[in-house]
Every structure is written in C-alpha cells, then in structure tokens.
Image: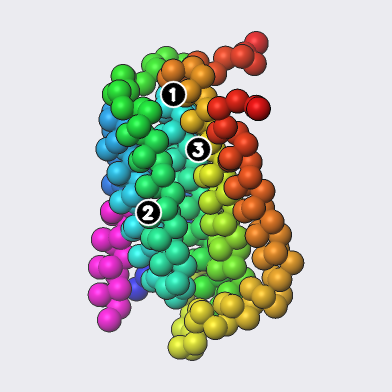
Amino acid sequence: MISLGHYLVLASFIFGIGAIGALTRKSAILVFLCIELMLNSVNLVLLGLGFYMKSLDGAVFAFFVMAVSAAEAAVGVAIIVSFIRRRRTSSLDAANLLKW
Amino acid sequence: MSTLLMVCFLVAAFTAFVGALMLVFHSRPMAAALGMVLSMTAFGVLYAMLHVPFLGLFQIIVYAGAVMVMVLFIIMSLDAKEEGPEVGGLQTFTAYVAGLGLIAFLMLTVRKSSLGVFPSVEKTFGSIKSFGHLLVGNYAVPFELASLLLVGAMVGAIVISRRRWQ
C-alpha cells in the first residue's frame, strides 16, 4: 500500500540531489535545471499532502508553482544566453564581476 | 490493484531518481539535460497517480516538452563543448555535506511525523471541473496575477536577449 511517506521520502531525496547538483555544477544551464528539479520535488510534496488532506488547494498551489517556474525559465534562459554571448562560456566561474 | 499501484510507483520513482542522478553527475551537458527530461516525465506519472492527472499532463507538455526543448536548443547551439570534471576542493565537499545533511534531516522529519496511508476519495476528486471552479473562484486573483507575471516574463526575456539598445 502506498502511503504519504513514500512520496515524501522520494521528494526529499530528489530535493537533496537537486541541491547537490545546484552547488557542484559548473555550467549555468545545468545549475538552472537542478533548481527546476528542486521545484518539482516541492510540487510533489504539495500534491501528496493535498491528496492526504482531501483538498485540491495543494494542486492549485502546484499549478501556480508551475506557472511561476515557466516564467522563470523564460527569463533565466534569456539571461544565460546573454551571459554566454558576452563571456563566450557558460561556466559560472566566469561570472565574477561582483566577486569580493 | 494495490500491488499494481505500488509497482507503478516504484518504477516511476526509480526513473525519476535515475534521471536526477544523470542530471547531477553526467559529464556531458546533453546527457544531463536528457536525464532531466526522463525525470520530468516520471514526475508527470507520479502527479497522475496522486489523482490530479491533468497536472501530470501539464508537467509532460510544459516541462518535458516546452521548457526542455528550449534548454536543449540552447545547449546544442551555444554550449556544445563537454564539461570537464567538476571543481574539486572545499566547495564540492561543502555541497555534498549540505545536500546529504539535508536529505538526512528530511528523512528524520518524515520518520518522526505520524503520517499514514492516503484516505479514500470519491471519484470526482481532482477532476478538471472542480479544479477549474477552484481556480477561477477562490483563487481568481492569484490566477490573474499569474497571467500578468507571464506577460512580464515574456517582455523581460525579449528585452534581455536583444543584442543592443537602439
């Protein structure tokens, strides 16, 4: 029998893997994708808890998270493209203008 | 029925897990992004198993379709060279400690909480009709704000990616 715990365990594993990726990856595009992965695992928690509470509010919130992350994807990809055009690399080590 | 659902869940969870590992650890950006596609599709299946099948469809259409096609296009056109080994040293070590600690902490929280099996719901739960009523009823203002946000993001993306101001 599938319980809520299964979904929560899976979501926390994916969230942790996404966090490791976001901190260790060099390419800006892949860091961006890791953050999207973390957003999706949070969506899974929202849907699971919504189903557990017999309420659709979690699904509505997950829907809004998806809309916001689609907007984020558009702006993020535009920023990454202009960054790659200017620096000729997608490595985040090249983003050092504000480095102390 | 119950074992079938369990098998479905395990297959989808394993696929999502493998896709996530590919995204984080594969050295070629293209393969990593394809791992993300795999993971997103498995997430769509999991959403459908949680009684919101249309959100699973959105997931596959919007993420595995639109967003990932855009990202793959960027990788193919701009970022074709292979990524070398990751930066070693303190940053990677800290990242692993932080990530694994986060997983351990979340596991502990899930274990401590007394959450049981899912309740049985009526057939209409999660239907697109009730979802739509909720979306334009209770959540009408956030819904309109989301449309505003999407238009703003569209204009912002065009402005950012222009070559120069004229």
Identify the residue position indicated by label 3 in the image: A77
Q: Is residue B161 above or below residue B110?
A: above
- Mark 3 → mark 1, Cα distance in angstroms: 12 Å
**Label placed on residue B64:** 2
Q: Main secondary structure of the magenta part?
A: helix
- Is B107 contained in the magenta span? no
Which residue corresponds to the image point at 47% horizontal and 24% vertical from the top-left? Answer: A84
Secondary structure beneath label 1: loop
Identify the residue position indicated by label 1 in the image: A90
Residue B135 horizontal/vertical position (percent): 64, 73
- Mark 2 → mark 3, Cα distance in angstroms: 16 Å
Question: Which amino acid type is shown beneath numbered disc 1?
Answer: Ser
Q: Tell me which chain the residue with mark 3 is part of.
A: A
Residue A93 horizontal/vertical position (percent): 49, 17
B91 or B153: nearer the viewer: B153
Question: Which amino acid type is shown beneath numbered disc 3?
Answer: Val
Q: Is residue A90 above or below residue B26?
A: above
Which residue corresponds to the image point at 36% horizontal and 27% vertical from the top-left? Answer: B79
**Label placed on residue B90:** none
Question: Which amino acid type is shown beneath numbered disc 2?
Answer: Ala
Residue B72 horizontal/vertical position (percent): 35, 41
Q: Which residues are magenta?
A: B1-17
Which residue corresponds to the image point at 31% horizontal and 27% vertical from the top-left? Answer: B80
Marks 2 and 1 on same chain: no
Taking the view exactly as shown, the residue that stands out farthest to the right is B141
